Image (cartoon, grey):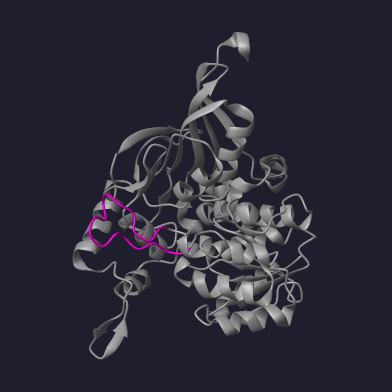
Amino acid sequence: MKVLMIGVGGVGEAIAAIAREQAWVEKLVLADYDVERARRVQKKLGDAQRFPVEFVDARKQEMIEALARKHRVDLIMNAVDPVFNIPIFEAAYRTGVHYMDMAMSLSQPHPERPYELPGVKLGDYQFQRAELWERKGLLALVGMGIEPGVVDVFARYAQDYLFDEIEEIGIRDGNNLVIEGYPFAPTFSIWTTIEECLNPPLIWEASRGWYTTEPFSEPEVFNFPEGIGPVEVVNVEHEEVLLIPRWIRARRVTFKYGLGRQFIEILKTLHLLGLDRKEPINVKGVMVAPRDVVAACLPNPAELGHKMHGKTCAGTWVKGFKDGYPYQVYIYQVLDNQESMQRWGTQAVVTQTAFGPVIAWEMLERGLWKGAGVLGPEAFDPIPFLERMADYGFPYKIQELQPLPQAIR
């Protein structure tokens, strides 16, 4: 398989590190606006021919198309912030290659009732073009990271193999990561974090469809496994709530993230001051987006691994019934930062995000996942994906939160 990857930030570097171990990845083009960073990653990988570096401006569709044709790629991997989704998505369609991303096209809040009704939802732009992709025989696999991505595969597995009836699917993400020397340092792109945390979160209910609430609503304490322990989680806008109901029968779908009180207060302050805005403003004759200034003031999450300690957990909490009995499970993946740094040289949060795309590439390369149109991970057979997770050094586990009676196990 030949892949053009747009973006060689923290997740892009982790994708490349994981892909290096897979012989079937014939070529992975490292394309980024910051060519020097891409070259540093290439040097770590140690194979300039297999991992060529290219300059790209992700806003310019024609530049992406030219690179796809130059390298005769099979797939374009979108590994940049989702603000660039549309030109990358359209470039793949125009050049006739498959497309994959880890976050879908951006939402826009309802202009009058933002905390009750959805406006433009995540992925609306892409799903509206699904028929065009299907007619062309091309696949756009959207939301294929860890969350969304691997957790969506877990949800499909729960429906097909664990439950007869599902009441609720709740994605729950938490960690006990500590970063030495920084009072405040996000472990993931602050641009994306601001976007998803300050937008109205979505909830799906079969009786009413999608609706929104206020940011950070419905706090609850979730007890995460493998030593992480209890973490307060809150509603956050995320793609799983848009993807899961399209393919999986559940009465309710939610996404909650463990942010911490300090992080939430900082995000609220950024919003109050207008520093979360992504539209450029005039600052002494220079047009600059306030959110970009915030990002520039913070440390690069990709470079914090050596100062991070602890574990991060992503998982799918499923409540329902099996053989008439109530049943609850948490299907999850935990990654320790020290292990991540030792094996792949990248910090745990970005590494965990990167496994999903590479395993999904293999599913496509080997013909184990087939499809055309705009599809989420839930649209495919979960078994071959799950079978390979441990082989990649990325095992999943199932914790029974409400076990079935012994007599029917």
Where residue 230 sits, quadrant-wise, is top left
Q: In this view, does 396 lie above or below 272?
A: above
What kind of secondary structure does the magenta stretch mostly adopt? loop
Q: Position of residue 292 (x, y in %)?
A: 35, 73
Q: Which of 273 and 298 is in front in this view?
A: 273
The quarter of the image holding the C terminus is top right
Q: Position of residue 78 (x, y in %)?
A: 57, 67
Q: Is residue 244 above or below residue 60?
A: above
Q: Is residue 7 visible?
A: no
Q: Is residue 219 above or below residue 302?
A: above
The question of residue 119 being in magenta is answered with: yes
- Number of marks present in the image shown: 0
The residue furthest bottom is 285
Residue at 52% from the left image edge and 36% from the top image edge? 249
> Which residues lie in the magenta part?
105-121
The quarter of the image holding the N terminus is bottom right
Q: Where is residue 12 in the image (x, y as percent from the top left)?
A: 58, 65
Q: Nearer the viewer, residue 338 or 34?
A: 34
Residue at 57% from the left image edge and 73% from the top image edge? 90
The question of residue 3 being in magenta is answered with: no
Residue at 60% from the left image edge and 76% from the top image edge? 91
Q: Which of 95 and 362 is in front in this view?
A: 95
Q: Where is residue 339 in the image (x, y as percent from the top left)?
A: 59, 47
Tell whether 281 sits left or right of 317.
Answer: left
Where residue 224 sits, quadrant-wise, is top left
The residue furthest top is 407
Residue at 69% from the left image edge and 73% from the top image edge? 96
Q: Is residue 132 visible?
A: yes
